Amino acid sequence: MRKTILRRHSGQSMVEFAVLAPIFFLLLLGTIDLGRAVYIYNTISDAAREGTRAAIPFDTPLPTSAAVLGAVQSKLGGGFALSTDPCLLSPPCASPTTPTTPNTGFIWYSSGIGTPGRGPVTVKISFLFQPWVPVVRDAAGNGLVISAQSTMVTEY
């Protein structure tokens, strides 16, 4: 009689695991995706600040847009597919373009790079973040645009 009772409950833990495992893995992978998003934001924020610092003239030769892009790319390192904002190729470009390809981004900078005198210089990086978790990816649609901007004033 006792063996019969044990057999009835032997599959209970397997059913509980089957019910709770998807929720557990969704939370686990969602936490990893959130960590990726925070890492990307911190990285592009640091790169935007570094690019703005490189745009401020403090010595000769005066900085150029190539110096700003070089400073941003050197701060980012590998793993980021960022390019110059396409609207900068046909001036005037007052506002940055939003990226449309997942896990890529654009670097936008304002006019006034290397211009002596008092004036603001802005560098903005926009990155289209695509989550790894399928449920979160479906909820996010094409992705989530993460952007960071830095503005500094030249005083020379």
Image (cartoon, rainbow, N blue to C red):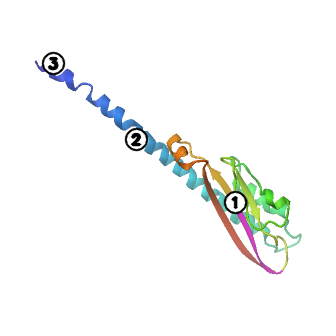
> Callout 2 environment at 10 Å: few (<14), some (14 to 19), or many (20+)?
few
Pick the front one: 97 or 74: 97
Q: Amino acid at mark 2?
A: Phe
69 w.r.t. 60: above or below:
above
The residue range painted magenta reads 117-125
Seen in the image, is 23 located left or right of residue 86?
A: left
Nearest to N terminus: mark 3 or mark 1: 3
Nearest to N terminus: mark 1 or mark 2: 2
Is the C-beta separation of discs 1 and 2 under 8 Å? no
Mark 2 — residue? 24
63 w.r.t. 100: above or below:
below
Residue for point 12% across, 20% down: 2
Q: Is residue 119 covered in magenta?
A: yes
Residue for point 52% across, 51% down: 34
Q: Amino acid at mark 1?
A: Ile
> Callout 1 environment at 10 Å: few (<14), some (14 to 19), or many (20+)?
many
Query: Mark number for residue 3?
Result: 3
Judged by its main secondary structure, the magenta piece is strand
Query: Mark number for residue 125?
Result: 1
In space, the residues marked 1 and 2 are separated at their CA atoms by 34 Å
Query: Mark number for residue 104?
Result: none
Residue for point 39% across, 36% down: 21
Is the C-beta separation of discs 3 and 1 under 8 Å? no
Query: What is the quadrant of the C terminus in the image?
Result: bottom right
Question: Percent from the top left, x then y, of residue 19?
Answer: 35, 35
Q: Amino acid at mark 3?
A: Lys
In space, the residues marked 2 and 3 are separated at their CA atoms by 33 Å
Question: Percent from the top left, x then y, of residue 117?
Answer: 83, 81
